[in-house]
Image (tube, coloured by chain):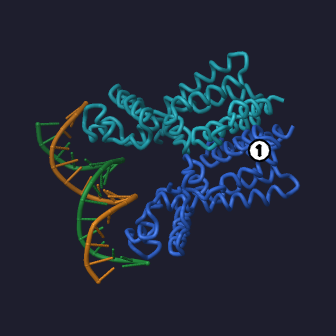
Chain colours: A blue, B cyan, C green, D orange
Amino acid sequence: MASSVPRELSPRAQEIVAAARELLEEEGADALSMRRLADRLGIRAPSIYKHLPDKRALENAIVSDLFEEVAAAFEAAAAGDDPLAGITDTYRRFAREHPHLFRLMTERPLDRDRLTPGAEERAAAPIVRAAGDPDTARAVWAFAHGMTVLELNGRFPPGADLDAAWRRGLDAFRR
Amino acid sequence: MASSVPRELSPRAQEIVAAARELLEEEGADALSMRRLADRLGIRAPSIYKHLPDKRALENAIVSDLFEEVAAAFEAAAAGDDPLAGITDTYRRFAREHPHLFRLMTERPLDRDRLTPGAEERAAAPIVRAAGDPDTARAVWAFAHGMTVLELNGRFPPGADLDAAWRRGLDAFRR
DNA sequence: GTCTATATCAAGATAGAC
DNA sequence: GTCTATCTTGATATAGAC
């Protein structure tokens, strides 16, 4: 039977993925078209298809890389003196510094069959460990995710003290 | 000086907005094009522009209506015996029953200048009242929003007990 | 590994006639 | 209030030559 695990990418394909990530990071999802990407690489759009099957593969490669990086960042944060605050701070900071990458990772269902196996679980593990149990971990994750996307989407009122709301939430889950 | 408050919509414009909402609700944001909308109305796409200036006005009209409806639903839920659970249940149920409307309302910055004035505040008020203070209200909203979008986007593991996570979160904020 | 040429499709919006 | 005709722009993707 056929395996759904993604094949290794050729060196050239990795260069293309890196360029795609830069383009996405700088200009957002709408700017990430095969034409714009080709421009950045100094080639023509059809040439990309010799290295990657389609646009989805490109996005999945970026997301797989991001999961690995986020997992490593969570593990580092969890080693500090306040694992829960460390991880949620990392979550918030990542989204503020790389909003377009964050959106790519979170705003739609994952193409789980085509991502690097295990990356999602590895990113989730430190949260479960810091929260103590899976239900609390999911609730904390939801809280952090909600704070983050509502901030990113400019949904809180202009004067809102977001740091206070973050503290309030983390306090609630620590008891 | 010019007012940025949206003008009243003509009866014909309201019919068009209603059709747009149905189309969005049934088939999602990608399906909401001026052409598809015109098809549904039995007219040609350019005719829509005689009634509404552009697509953005169409979306803003839908969002304004939704805020009014959500506000009313929150007020009704807050009148029950458990205001906090009532409101968050209403939030979750709305998103599950009308995912495309929910996404239109929440996935991008609001065009506040072009929405019906006061609608956003009216929807927020019951949460603040139920939570007790603005910081807690924002934290609870973030939790509910996070649970809702993560569920909508299929981000929790298949076997996850989401009702337990919801209970865990609400419990935390009630202490 | 990259090219040109092309297929296919769709989007938002405007001009001006009726 | 609706029409036809059109503009302008853009997307993903394929075939086949070099």
Residue A29 spot, x, y in % from top left: 50, 56
> What percent of the width, then of the height, locates residue D2?
22, 34
Q: Image height check: is A116 above or below A11?
A: above
Q: Chain of mark 1?
A: A
Can the viewer see residue A92?
A: no
Q: Please state if B141 lies on the left or on the right of D16 as rendered.
A: right
Instruction: Determine which quarter of the picture holds residue A157.
Output: top right
For badge 1, the amino acid type reads Trp
**Which residue lies under the disc numbered 1?**
A166
Q: How busy is the neighbourhood of tag 1: few (under 14 within 10 Å), some, or many (20 plus)? A: many
* Residue sitting at x 78%, y 43%: A164
Question: Which element is circle 1 on?
Answer: helix
Identify which residue, A49 or A85, lies in the foreground: A49
Residue shown at the point (60%, 59%) measured from the top left: A116
Q: Relative to the observer, which residue lies in front, A108 or B57? A: A108
Q: Nearer the viewer, residue B37 or A15?
A: A15
